[in-house]
Image (spheres, grey):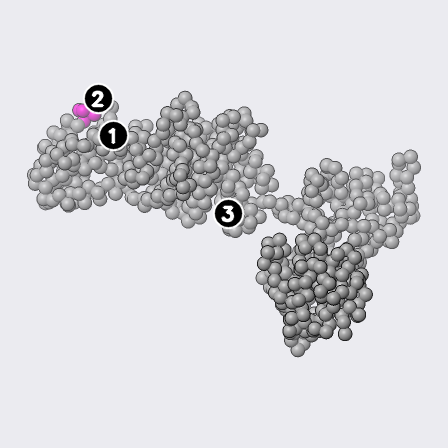
Amino acid sequence: MLVRMKYQYPIIKGETVQFKELKLARAKKIALATLEHPYCINDSICFVSREDGAEIILVTFDNEIPDSPINGIQVFEDVAIICYKEDKCFPEVYALRDDFNGGLPHTNARPFEHPVNLCVTEQLFEEVKHKFNAFEFIELIRRWFSLSSEGILHQENQPLESFFYTKGYIIIPANSSPKDFNFLRKIGNSMLYSLSKEPTGEYPFSLISFKADAQVHGFIRREPVRISDLDEVVRLKEVPFSEAVLKLFNDILSRFTASEAFFKCNFAFHCEIPVLRNYKDKSPSGLKNLFFLTQQSYMDIGLKSGCIGEAEGNYSILIPRKFDLNIIKDTPIVLFSPLIDFSPASAALLNNIKPNNLNLLLVGAGALGSQVLSVFSRLGFGKWTVIDHDFMLPHNLAKHALNRKDIGFNKATKISEEVNELLGEEVVKPIEKNFLELVKDKEFDEIIAKPEVIIDMSTSIAVARKISRDIDKESDKPRISAFLNPIGTDLVVLAEDEKRTHRLDFLEMQYYRCIFNEKKLHDHLRINDSDKIRYNRNSCRDITNKINQTDVAIHASICAKSLKKIIEEGNSYLSIWSVNNDTHEVNHFSFEPSKWIVKKLDNWEICIDEWLVQKMIAYRSKKLPKETGGILIGSIDTERNILYLIDTIIAPADSVENSTSFVRGTQGLLEEYNLYQEVTDSQVNYLGEWHSHPQGCSINPSKLDNVLFHYLSEQLEHQGLPVVMCIIGDNGFSLIFKT
């Protein structure tokens, strides 16, 4: 028997046609697939052409289902497949049987209860239209019946089914409930509303909240268009929704004159519905929030019901009249669903990372700092304090995360406002002070004690040294320094480990040595006069030169990604990323931090890198039984009386190396030393000499060593520089030092 003969639904009304009379390409392909499919009952198939140009394939499916199916699915199910002339969506699939169960998972709401519209795929038609296969589409329908008959169409790991398709969204602030608000405010011309405690903006809605009885998810019957349509699916203590609204309206009638603004706005309902995944569940799997908006106010319904009267623009309650249930039932509604506002938690979820609320301190909200903080805010990562005394100037807009409206305002304050507004809560606190001055304030101890990690992006060596060396009593937390090279093509990240074994100032010294020893980085700190845009250049970390925003953006993302890893893992780090301007590739240079040996001599702290010690020992071993040596390269901090020894230029070719003496030569030495200074932007200096002693000899200085050291100290004394001599022997090394 033809399927068409059984049903008189309006959506399948039309003229019966032959296969060859079908005009739509999509309909022809599906019709052919049903005619050739072994599980489509051939003599049941017929075709219908509707007046609007839609074409329908009517067919009976022979389904593979278990012996005791659930959800009322039968072996033979009559189906209508409707193809539309516009071809902008998947063909609609309807189960035609008039007693087919409504409210099953993966069915779509329609203004009518039958036939039931089946959702046979979750794919977007636009994305798969180019590879649509009619035979596979038929299989999707059969799969829907088969899995529904076993109750497994909606998988346990899938989200709960939505109750209805909605027309728009109500934005819910994180950590808030709609029950805490009394009004809705429309956002622009969109179908978005935000919650409000006051009737602000155009067309505000009064909001009334209900907590409904628990329901099994996916209980859609038909798309509700008036309040009475909700009675089947939304009940409050077994009371149908419209009757609950009637009771509420009557209960609050006495407060009519006290809250005129609330009663004059069109009203909206918020329903919190506990949702059961399965009908046998005793406790809900979650909560669904639904919103129903009307174009009627409490006052409008009261006037129609006759319980509110109006005379010359004045309104009053007409006792003992009550609201009319039928008027409430007949009130049109439009459905809206909740949309959780953007927050740190949702940001982390959307970025597929674990939430992290560590207290972090950022010193410097310039180009790199602002863009890194912006990345972290969209990751929902961290709670921040930002310190910067600088103000936005017009030229900062080329590379800063802030905008024109922020010109003339403090960078830390404005970037904090922007991030907090983005996330809807206070995530960043600004401090409008120079860090070097802030350390003198009374509240500094409290500020520096809170963060778990201290991050310096100030582009200031003075700040970096202060953070590394001078606040140990106030905080024992690890420090991280991140900065760009002068032309912005390279990013440097130096990070202490959790125990601060590799201190930031030590990492800085090793960084200088690394860029010298890696020839690919010899231009890392070089800058041409044409690249400078300010009157002076404060340090090798100055990023206020001519820098391309594309480089800053690339490095800001890399920086945020690397900092996140460092903060979570707690390991030390010394890395440089370099952008190739021709290929746009990013090269990564990673260096293993080495340990340091610290000695106290004459009120000075002499810090010698173990890497350097091992280099000198290895070179001594290579030259034995002869003595050898070289010059010592390092840096001096005269403010703190610290001397750092990081590298050596070994004995030039013209040196005299004997078994009992060593005379350092000069061939090529000055050229290599000048190159070292050029590559490191003069951040390192000549600090003295080293030589080895033969096997079996002490590492104490000989008479000749003392004479040489006296000569060196006299030469450097005129420059106001300390001098150091290192002697390498069987038992390690010794140092001679004089300021």
Q: Residue 153, how many percent across, how many down?
A: 63, 66
Label 2: element kind: loop
Q: Which of 475 and 279 is in front in this view?
A: 279
Label 1: element kind: helix
Q: What stretch is highlighted in magenta?
A: 713-717
Tell me which residue sits at (36%, 27%) in the image: 528
Whichever of labels 3 and 1 marks the residue nearer the N terminus, that label is 3
Quadrant in which the N terminus is drawn: bottom right
Please name the residue that numbered disc 1 is placed on: 674
Q: Nearer the viewer, residue 124 or 694?
A: 124
Q: How crowded is mark 1: few (under 14 residues within 10 Å), some or many (20 or more)?
A: few
Quadrant in which the C terminus is drawn: top left
Secondary structure, magenta segment, majority class: helix
Whichever of labels 1 and 2 marks the residue nearer the N terminus, that label is 1
Q: Residue 189, how many percent across, how many down?
A: 70, 40
In this rendering, does residue 466 appear at all? no
Q: Determine which of the numbered discs, if any, sits on residue 356 in the image.
A: 3
